[in-house]
Image (tube, rainbow, N blue to C red):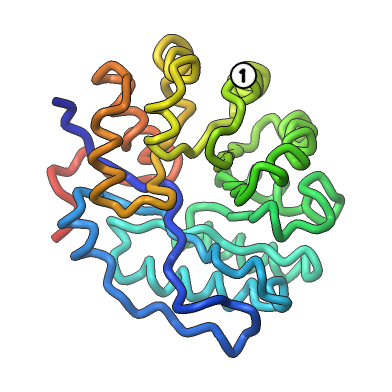
Amino acid sequence: MTHAAIIDALFSIPQKGPITQIADCIPYLEDLAPRMKTSGITGAVLVHGNCMHCQYQWNCADRKTHEIVNIVARHPRQLRGLAAYDPLRIGESLRWIDEAVSKGELAGAYVQAECCVTGLDAPRMYPLYGMCAKLRAPVVVDFGSRDRWVYHRPQLEVVAADFPELDLLLAAPPQSESILMVQMMKHFPRVSFVLGPQELQQNESLCEYLELQGRDRALFRSASEEWPLAVQIGKGVPLSPAARRAYLGENAAKVFGFAIEASSLIA
């Protein structure tokens, strides 16, 4: 049995009901530590990711970022957070991301492909990539549908080529073509994937690549599964113990700065 600290590299804080306008937003007040402890989760990277249907999604990027900062501050050893970016307020966005990452309040930036109407390789997105590359902070790009993945993937290849020093973590949708993921990892050394364990359970070729060449290129996420079930599936992914430890926690610890050498991060 593999003994590993398990880090959820992409956890969207829950929202009550559909978010379609600012009035729908209710501050998230739950203390995540007890749920993490009982589920076997050592750490989690938090995002504000349930706003893609809200017509004001860009206008409150600073509010979303501030809320993530406040949640992380409750348990800074167990939690990390990612900033939202507003491409219509570039200067202001860069200031709050720079300040939060430099102070250690946040670990990087988060982008939802569905919300990026101008394209991930649009000029208004490039200041974010440049800032994160300078700060050595990752950018996590989340894809909620296969259509968005097919549409945006070529754009991300352009971004990866233009910013070879930037860590790009891609949360591809379920059942994405493993051959395309492997090709991207081979061509771009700083592109990694945030994958639910059920995807690895069903993908022999991807597991083979991770085992033989790309052990440091995949990070665990619970995706739509509840933490206990995702942890159970994760412990059984068809990887060697060393590769499984890397996938479940070691890679995320390195990218996001978790101290998983401690025997327990949850008090």
Q: What amino acid is at disc 1?
A: Ile
Residue sitting at the far bottom: 23
The residue drawn where x is 41% and y is 54% is 45
Residue at the disc numbered 1: 179
Q: In the figure, 76 relative to 39: above or below?
A: below
Q: Is residue 67 left or right of residue 39?
A: right
Q: In the figure, 104 relative to 247: above or below?
A: below
Q: Which residue occupies the foreground of this view, 59 or 76?
A: 59
Tag 1, which secondary structure? helix
Q: Which residue occupies the foreground of this view, 251 or 73?
A: 251
Q: In the figure, 133 relative to 71: above or below?
A: above
The quarter of the displayed image where residue 190 is located: top right
Whole-percent x, y for residue 24 in the image: 56, 85
The quarter of the displayed image where residue 237 is located: top left
Query: Quick one: quadrant of the C terminus?
Result: bottom left
The residue drawn where x is 57% and y is 62% is 83
Q: Is residue 186 left or right of residue 266?
A: right
Q: Which residue occupies the foreground of this view, 69 or 157?
A: 157
Query: Quick one: quadrant of the N terminus?
Result: top left
The residue drawn where x is 55% and y is 33% is 175
The residue drawn where x is 73% and y is 37% is 150
The number of numbered badges drawn on the structure is: 1
Q: Is residue 9 left or right of residue 1?
A: right
Whole-percent x, y for residue 176 in the image: 59, 32
Q: In the figure, 4 relative to 45: above or below?
A: above
Whole-percent x, y for residue 221 in the image: 41, 44
Q: Which residue occupies the foreground of this view, 94 or 1?
A: 1
